[in-house]
Image (tube, rainbow, N blue to C red):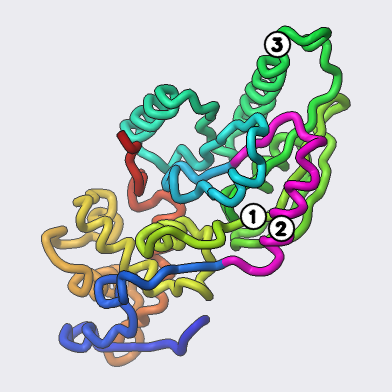
Amino acid sequence: MTSKKRYKSFTNTDELDGIKITPERKNQSEHINWFPGHMNKAIREIKAKLKMIDLVLELRDARAPMSTGNSALIEAIGNKNRLIIFNKSNLVDEKDLINWKKWLKKNSINFLFINALEKDSAQRVITKAKELILARHEGEVDAKKKEKFSLMMIGLPNTGKSTLINSIAGRKSTKTADKPGYTRRQQWIRVEETLELMDTPGIMPPKIATYKEGLYLAAIHAIPSKIVDEETTACFLIKYLLEKKSLEFQQRYNLNSLEVDYLTILPEIAVYRKCLIKGGLIDYERVYRIVTQDFREGKLGLHCFQYPKE
């Protein structure tokens, strides 16, 4: 926990304004940043290994397609052949997926939308990767007879890299954890006799462009709660879901209306989910955990924070 537990009476809504941090009162010019020293080292190591790599697999989160990109990583790999893989597409509305696919095709970007937990995703990635490598060498002597393929996977923390690698390798080749920054070193994984894959640590941008983008990354758990606490993240999500008029959100917590502000919603969620203690006080931290976890698991509907730029 980043702060002491706070309990308040849900019968006194005036006290709700005492919440220590809320997205609308926080300085909007303040940037959210998280770039530990090991990430800078990881970028240097990626550059050093690129000559050995045929194709870079860049993993992003489909709920924040632009914000889970990393300009520092893109600069590091330069003109190296790249495939952008948007993971967790099962948590995004189909209409948003269609719009993103159209935009990516229009801009001639190599991409795949996957759910790393589905069995066929790994094979789709391998097949597409080999196609792109061979296409890049089309016309070269014996290009079609290429015997070995070397891939490198890069991306932000907690976008599902280890899960996808384990699926590709068909075994527990890397450890996985539901927390950002778990992988700290590069490692080679032999997928098959002709295919090797290098895993790299999750790397954040040295500077997140805007405060709102930082909240997107906190919401999908690319940033740990020690940097952006669960209160700030949960309040942001509640405001977002109210603005989206999310019926799934309303139904999940049996809310009376979506035509209210987030301060009104907090006690409703607390009462419905029994986040109360003796005396009718609210365990706010439990409410925050429930909202953030439900969102991350897709229990509050299918969402995408960003739309394709024209």
| Majority SS type along the magenta span | helix
Q: Tell me: residue 91, above or below residue 192.
A: below
Of the two numbered discs 3 and 1 in the rendering, the one whose residue sits closer to the viewer: 3
Q: How far apart are the two marked residues, 3 and 1, measured between alpha carbons?
A: 32 Å
* Amino acid type, mark 2: Thr
What's the amino acid at mark 1? Gly
User: Contact, CB < 8 Å: mark 3 with mark 2?
Assistant: no
The span picked out in magenta is: 35-58
- Location of the C terminus by quadrant is top left
- What's the residue at 70%, 31% (across, down)? 55
Label 3 is placed on what type of residue?
Answer: Glu
> Badge 2: few (under 14), some or many (20 or more) residues near its Cα, within 10 Å?
many
Q: Residue at the location (59% across, 43% down)?
A: 74
In the rendered image, residue 259, in percent from the top left (x then y), is placed at 11, 60
Q: Which residue is mark 3?
A: 138
Give yes or no for contact between labels 1 and 2 (Cβ–Cβ under 8 Å): yes
In this image, 251 relative to 152: left or right? left
- Label 1 sits on a secondary structure element that is loop
- Badge 1: few (under 14), some or many (20 or more) residues near its Cα, within 10 Å? many
Q: Magenta segment: does it hold 61?
A: no
User: Can residue 294 be seen?
Assistant: no
Is residue 232 something that shows in the picture? yes
